[in-house]
Image (cartoon, rainbow, N blue to C red):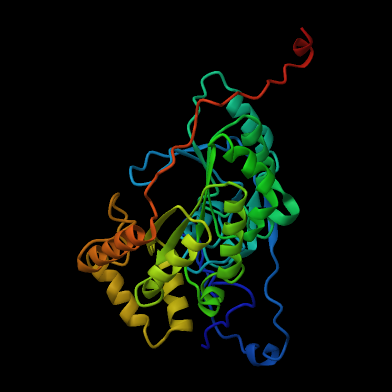
Amino acid sequence: MKPPSLPRGRGSRLNPGDRFADWQRAAFDDGWADDVADEPDHGPATTLLLDKARSVIVRNASPDVPFAQSINPYKGCEHGCAYCFARPGHAYLGLSPGLDFETKIAWKPDAPAVLRRELAAPGYRCQPVALGINTDGWQPVERRLGLTRQLLAILAETRHPVSIVTKSALIERDIDLLADLARDGLVQVMFSVTTLDPRLARQLEPRAASPARRLAAMARLHGAGVPVGVLFAPLIPAINDHEMEKVLEAAQAAGAETAGYVLLRLPRELRELFEDWLVTHYPDRAGHVLSLLRQLRGGELNDSRFGHRMRGEGVFADLYSQRLRRCCERLGLNRNRRQLVTTAFRPPGRDDGQLALF
């Protein structure tokens, strides 16, 4: 049977069932494909799903990530990045990590109220929170929902430190809040820049801002006094690894103070999805890419061990690490690591009804 074509504006052409389902879908040829082949493909539309928030602050004990708590305004991401490590999480919603992840976005309209309640709890102790880790808080649906801005406004109001990772130029909309936080050392924004090649970027990240647009947003935030950095992530052997130095140079010119990289991770369903992406876009080198990944992952396509999952191991992993270090030394990156301030935090006022009058 002919494999499905890539939907317009989306990153995955597959939509495998979630691993928790009692049954699985399987494609078969019912004889109708030729009759509909000439119909225009407008691509699947985005559907919003309500996700009631019992809590919004998620605690994290992983020793190889630089934050202990995070907030994700959305589940799923319209950017449709073929490599997104968060895709398997959509299975917990009973949805596919494939096309569903890009087109069925869960959001938490009550998240701002819940965040206020959590920050006002007597036992809460302030420490930096990462905003948008498993999903980009400034993905396209944010333009009309404004949920991330509401959460950021609460963090600014309470003088709560926040770190951000994004690949969206929409973050420029919130430059007023970010500049306000930056004045007290309460924010740092990292831009994910995977490539400078617009063609490759459109294949890898079909609905994310172009690389040039991300760098322009970085420069604008830097000009407003907001500390910015760059993540060359993910690094994909034989696809974009040759661009590391050029990406860091462009980011440094746009105001980046810090830089890092993350090796491609392929947990669970993402292995099948990314392999299909490789075969679709780079059939001539798909086998070579997978071979290099196995050399970096101890013979496997994924290694979830702390301390190994972000960098890999072996000769190629050492080479990537050396390249980053030498490039940063040459460009003056990572010389000063900012520590976000936690002493300015002031809990939000509690809504005690009539008692608030006394």
- State the residue in front, 348 or 248: 248
- State the residue in front, 274 or 129: 129
Residue 64 lies, in percent from the top left, at: 34, 46
Please, is residue 207 above or below residue 153 in the view? below
Q: Residue at point 40% right, 76% down?
A: 239
Residue 200 lies, in percent from the top left, at: 51, 77
Q: Left or right: 63 with respect to 340?
A: left
Please, is residue 48 above or below residue 188 in the view? below
- State the residue in front, 240 or 113: 240
The residue furthest left is 315
Corner quadrant of residue 154: top right
Q: Residue at point 57% right, 61% down?
A: 101
The residue furthest top is 358
Corner quadrant of residue 149: top right
Residue 5 lies, in percent from the top left, at: 58, 83
Q: Residue at point 34% right, 77% down?
A: 289
Number of residue marks: 0
Residue 127 lies, in percent from the top left, at: 48, 32
Q: Left or right: 149 with respect to 206?
A: right
- In the picture, which quadrant includes the C terminus? top right
Task: Answer yes or no: is residue 214 visible.
Answer: yes
Task: Answer yes or no: is residue 209 visible.
Answer: no
- State the residue in front, 13 or 246: 246
